[in-house]
């Protein structure tokens, strides 16, 4: 168990444990538990990654069912690659959630799989609204076709959660939905569970954090190759961070990436080393001290793909550049990248490429075949943003 994880657990004083228990009992004693009284909402929406579901998540769901007829559980970060931050699929998280409740409760929890739209909040919001509306329509008798989700005129809908940190900013993105805030339970969070799981193992996960049923599920999951892969990646990341342990400030890294497209194809490399070994990625890497961003991008592109296109042509084909700075985009640390969109035109044959340097393989991939779960870190989302800037004329 890491010192960080142990400290977070030991920070729970007896008084705080009792306070958590007291607030939970207050929830259970609430008048809303009387199932003969009308509920405040028809549906409460709970949005979270639940990687994995903790007892805090369980209590929010139970509170939602005290206040509403059903809870719509929106599980985020679906259809993405397994990472240390998002190790479990939608199906796996759904199974863990249901394991925490009696079978009679299962029909009261409606699940929605929500993809990430990193750097595209509006698309994320529209997609979520669409899926929630569809879920409600499927569960309303008669399938009322004219129902809207505006003003709560047709259905009493609300949002439930707690503002635990800056990753919960989305709670303010639904002005048309009533909001129910649940006090955070100190020390009970999924990050601590993941840290323990991938450093010292499931046996060291504190039982105050997750239910026994989830622990049982995790024990079985730890027998899979996915767990072994992520354990190795955690060891790599830990060693990587140790290089900067004596730095007076947290390190920040500057990288560049090339989004090279031609004839409906995009140039990708297969990573030859951790993190993300074996995953598809954009050609790119760290900026050298005496390079401009464009120079660094062109150097990395040449080193990793041996792209047979003259540099002046590449420079003249740059259509856009944009910086991508999601704080969670890389487990290695704060990494800010600038992507360059290069649109090669006027060629009938795709230029020859060959994987080199730290790229095991380079290949032109049809854009229509891209799958988020096969791409490294946030590269799928970078590609989506940059393709939106593509000029075809």
Image (cartoon, grey):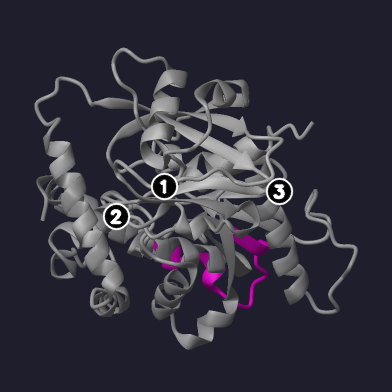
Q: Is residue 250 left or right of residue 151?
A: left
Residue 308 percent coordinates (x, y): 50, 37
Of 69 and 274, the residue lying toward us: 274
Q: Residues within 10 Å of mark 1 (few under 14, many from 20)?
A: some
Residue under the image location 56 percent in, 43 percent down:
351
Q: CA distance from mark 3 to mark 2?
A: 31 Å
Q: Say which label, 3 or 2, has the lower sequence index.
A: 3
First in sequence: mark 3 vs mark 1 = 3
Q: Which residues are magenta?
A: 26-45
Q: Residue lying at the far right in this picture: please name it.
A: 146
Q: Residues within 10 Å of mark 2 (few under 14, many from 20)?
A: many
Q: CA distance from mark 2 to mark 1?
A: 48 Å
Q: Quadrant of residue 346?
A: top right
Which residue does the numbered mark 1 point to in the structure image? 354
Query: Can residue 12 be seen?
Result: no
Badge 3 is on which residue?
Answer: 126
Left or right of 260 in this view: 263: right
Residue 170 rendering spot, x and y as whole percentages: 56, 42
Q: Residue at x 38, y 60 (%)?
A: 82
Instruction: Compute the Cα span from label 3 to label 1.
Output: 40 Å
* Image point (56%, 38%), residue name: 260
Instruction: Identify the secondary structure beneath mark 2.
Output: loop
Q: Nearer the viewer, mark 3 or mark 1?
A: 1
Which residue is label 2 attached to? 188
**Quarter-of-image position of residue 4:** top left
């Amino acid at each position: 168990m890491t010192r960080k994880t142990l400290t977070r657990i030991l920070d729970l004083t007896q008084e705080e444990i009792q306070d958590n228990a007291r607030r939970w009992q207050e929830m259970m004693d609430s008048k809303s538990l009387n199932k003969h009284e009308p509920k405040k909402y028809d549906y409460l929406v709970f949005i979270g990654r639940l990687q994995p579901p903790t007892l805090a998540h369980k209590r929010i769901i139970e509170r939602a069912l005290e206040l509403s007829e059903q809870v719509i559980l929106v599980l985020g970060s679906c259809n993405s690659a397994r990472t240390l931050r998002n190790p479990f699929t939608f199906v796996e998280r759904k199974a863990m959630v249901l394991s925490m409740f009696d079978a009679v409760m299962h029909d009261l929890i409606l699940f929605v799989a929500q993809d990430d739209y990193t750097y595209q909040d509006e698309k994320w919001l529209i997609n979520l609204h669409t899926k929630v509306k569809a879920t409600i329509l499927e569960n309303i008798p008669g399938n009322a076709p004219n129902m809207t989700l505006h003003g709560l005129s047709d259905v009493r809908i609300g949002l439930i959660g707690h503002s635990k940190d800056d990753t919960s900013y989305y709670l303010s993105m639904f002005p048309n939905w009533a909001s129910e805030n649940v006090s955070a339970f100190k020390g009970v969070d999924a990050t601590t569970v993941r840290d323990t799981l991938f450093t010292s193992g499931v046996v060291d996960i504190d039982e105050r954090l997750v239910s026994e049923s989830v622990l049982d599920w995790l024990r079985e999951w730890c027998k899979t190759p996915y767990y072994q892969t992520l354990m190795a990646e955690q060891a790599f990341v830990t060693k990587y961070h140790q290089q900067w342990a004596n730095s007076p400030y947290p390190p920040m890294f500057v990288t560049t990436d090339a989004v090279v497209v031609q004839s409906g194809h995009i140039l990708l490399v297969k990573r030859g080393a951790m993190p993300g070994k074996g995953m598809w990625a954009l050609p790119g890497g760290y900026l050298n001290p005496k390079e401009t961003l464009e120079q660094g991008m062109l150097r990395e592109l040449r080193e990793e793909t041996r792209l047979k296109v003259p540099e002046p042509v590449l420079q003249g084909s740059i259509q856009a550049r944009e910086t991508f700075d999601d704080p969670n985009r890389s487990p290695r640390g704060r990494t800010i990248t600038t992507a360059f969109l290069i649109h090669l035109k006027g060629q009938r044959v795709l230029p020859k490429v060959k994987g080199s340097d730290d790229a095991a393989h380079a290949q032109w991939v049809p854009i229509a075949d891209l799958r988020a779960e096969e791409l490294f870190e946030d590269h799928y989302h970078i590609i989506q943003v940059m393709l939106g800037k593509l000029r075809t004329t």
